[in-house]
Image: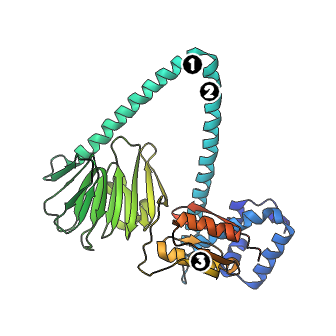
């Protein structure tokens, strides 16, 4: 067992014996890792996190498992965990530098002059960025026979398309589209914010071009926020599924399988945030997830196993919630959760069962060491 004493989260996730324990739950592996945790309680939290992260990968596969594909998913998941750590470190570093800079500025007025110059340069860059973003819409629509709708009011504006789809255009936004769509696809061009309710037509994908992104759907409802002055573009899915691509990738890649590897798939209550400056695409949960399922759920629980409670939330909101079912099956929950939001529900549940949760790649991961009955 000595080889595991220096293991970190990533080491456990990549260890073959650890993976077999999580994946197959063989008796001898269960005995080994339970004994190891008893003898090394300081590593229990890292082991629990590693176990839960691996379960989030294995959950997407049921019977015929492609080891290469699973290894790829594990590496992708670890890269996201590393990115989250780096972001946290960078944020702390930036705060520290800001505090140091503030002290310097207070001591010497020369630095205030330098700060003013930097501010002016920054504003100039933002203006230039704004002009580039504005020209993106104009460039995409130039030379095309399109109908343009603008919303210059203070309230939303509903627009009906020839295929039966509806667009709710928000204030200070505009959209262009053909009077009649092509036989093979339906294309629209957005500047600003709009909610789309797209009619299903599997033979004609619906494509929304907004800033540097292309959102592709067959039939669903979602919101795109592509304001000209913003440095971020967001896509939020209410129901169904959409695929989001960078325009450069969408234009260059013709092979559909290769194209899918460059895009990001979003499902109900998921959001993609595109950083215009870095071209990074981040998947997360929307700020206020809504119930998607048509099955009536009261969310009133009396001594209900936590595993069943989390399953009910997963079914209702159509969001992946990753947790150790065996561990939480013995944790009873008594609570009335009909009026709370999804995140408030999770806060209450985690407090009851002595657990915590985090958002990772558009999923909710619950970490728990078990509960005290």
Q: Residue at x 66, y 75 (%)?
A: 324
Q: Which residue is under mark 1?
A: 111
Q: Label 3, label 2: how many angstroms apart (C-alpha)?
A: 49 Å
- Disc 2 packing (10 Å; few <14; some 14–19; many ≥20): few
Q: Which of marks 1 and 3 precedes in the sequence?
A: 1
The crowding category of the residue bearing disc 3, from other C-alpha atoms within 10 Å (few below 14, some 14 to 19, many at least 20), is many
Where residue 314 appears, as percent x and y from the top left, is 52, 74
* Secondary structure under the numbered disc 2 in the rendered image: helix
Question: Does the residue at mark 3 contact the one at mark 2 (Cβ under 8 Å)?
Answer: no
Is there CB contact under 8 Å for labels 1 and 2?
yes
* 1 or 2: tag closer to the N-terminus: 2
At x 33%, y 48%, the residue is 211
Can residue 56 be seen at all in this image of the molecule?
yes
* Residue situated in front as seen by the camera: 373 or 210: 373
Q: In this rendering, is residue 297 above or below 8?
A: below
Question: Which residue is rendered at x = 51% and y = 79% of the image?
Answer: 298
| Residue 53 placement: quadrant | bottom right
The secondary structure type at the circle numbered 3 is helix
Is residue 64 rendered to the left or right of residue 121? right
Horizontally, is 211 left or right of 186 in the view? right
* Mark 3, residue position: 309
Q: Position of residue 256 (x, y in %)?
A: 35, 66
């Amino acid at each position: 067992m000595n080889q595991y004493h220096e293991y970190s989260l990533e080491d456990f996730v990549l260890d073959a014996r650890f993976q077999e324990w999580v994946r197959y739950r063989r008796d001898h592996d269960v005995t080994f890792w339970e004994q190891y945790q008893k003898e090394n309680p300081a590593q229990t939290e890292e082991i629990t996190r590693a176990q839960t992260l691996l379960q989030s990968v294995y959950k997407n596969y049921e019977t015929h498992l492609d080891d290469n594909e699973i290894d790829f998913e594990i590496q992708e998941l670890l890269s996201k965990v590393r990115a989250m750590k780096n972001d946290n470190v960078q944020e702390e570093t930036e705060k520290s530098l800001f505090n140091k800079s503030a002290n310097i500025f207070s001591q010497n007025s020369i630095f205030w002059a330098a700060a003013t110059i930097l501010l002016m340069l920054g504003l100039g860059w933002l203006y230039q960025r704004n002009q580039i973003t504005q020209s993106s819409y104009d460039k995409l629509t130039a030379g095309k026979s399109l109908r343009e709708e603008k919303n210059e009011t203070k309230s939303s504006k509903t627009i009906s398309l020839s295929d039966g789809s509806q667009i709710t255009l928000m204030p200070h936004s505009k959209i262009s589209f053909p009077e009649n769509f092509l036989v093979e696809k339906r294309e629209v061009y957005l500047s600003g914010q709009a909610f789309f309710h797209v009619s299903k037509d599997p033979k004609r994908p619906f494509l929304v071009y907004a800033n540097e992104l292309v959102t592709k759907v067959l039939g669903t409802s979602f919101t795109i926020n592509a304001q000209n002055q913003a440095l971020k573009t967001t896509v939020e899915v209410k129901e169904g599924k959409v695929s989001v691509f960078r325009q450069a990738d969408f234009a260059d890649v013709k092979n559909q399988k290769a194209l899918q590897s460059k895009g990001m798939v979003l499902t109900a209550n998921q959001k993609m945030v595109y950083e215009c400056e870095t071209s990074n695409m981040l998947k997360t949960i929307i700020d206020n997830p809504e119930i998607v399922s048509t099955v009536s759920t009261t969310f009133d629980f009396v001594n209900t196993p936590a595993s069943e409670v989390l399953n009910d939330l997963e079914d209702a909101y159509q969001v992946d919630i990753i947790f150790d079912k065996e561990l939480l099956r013995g944790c009873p929950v008594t609570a009335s959760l009909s009026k709370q939001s999804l995140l408030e529900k999770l806060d209450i549940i985690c407090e009851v069962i002595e657990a915590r949760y985090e958002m990772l790649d558009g999923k909710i991961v619950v970490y728990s060491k078990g509960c005290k009955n």
